[in-house]
Image: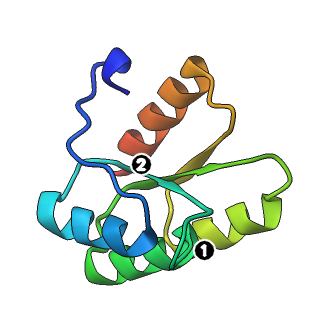
Amino acid sequence: MEGLGHQVIATASTGRQAIEAYRQHRPDLMTMDISMPDMDGMEATAAIVAEFPEARIMMVTSHGQERMVIDSLDAGAKGYVLKPVRIEKLSDMIAKVMERAL
């Protein structure tokens, strides 16, 4: 993301860490993996959006997880990118997610 002109301000390895990182940093955009230990990305997204409705969260997922993507969008995610992440797709989705927030 830094190569696209964005600054990474925090990382998290678990869903609970992601929630705490959002609370602490309140980023303009958060990328969230669907599969994480202790709490998946959908649960973490729902928890963040419940507390911060303005949160812009973009899911990162593998092929074959279409149902999880839909569930993530229902949980409040604003978009998604598929792994392996291609820089052009990432750039496009970031722009769309940020545009939707206006």
Few, some or many C-alpha atoms within 10 Å of disc 2 (few <14, some 14-19, many ≥20)?
few
| Labelled disc at residue 100 | 2
Residue 23 left/right relative to 77? left
SS category of the residue bearing label 1: helix
SS category of the residue bearing label 2: helix
92 to 38, vertically: above or below? above
Q: Quadrant of residue 24?
A: bottom left
Quarter the N terminus occupies: top left
45 to 84, vertically: above or below? below
Q: Amino acid at mark 1?
A: Asp
The structure residue drawn at horizontal position 29% and vertical position 66%, both measured from the top left corner, is: 54
Q: Amino acid at mark 2?
A: Arg
Residue 97 left/right relative to 81? left
| Labelled disc at residue 74 | 1
The structure residue drawn at horizontal position 44% and vertical position 71%, both measured from the top left corner, is: 15
x, y (%) of residue 95?
43, 32
Outermost right residue: 64
Residue 98 left/right relative to 76? left
Label located before the other in sequence (1 or 2)? 1
Looking at the image, which is closer to me, 2 or 29?
A: 2
| Labelled disc at residue 39 | none
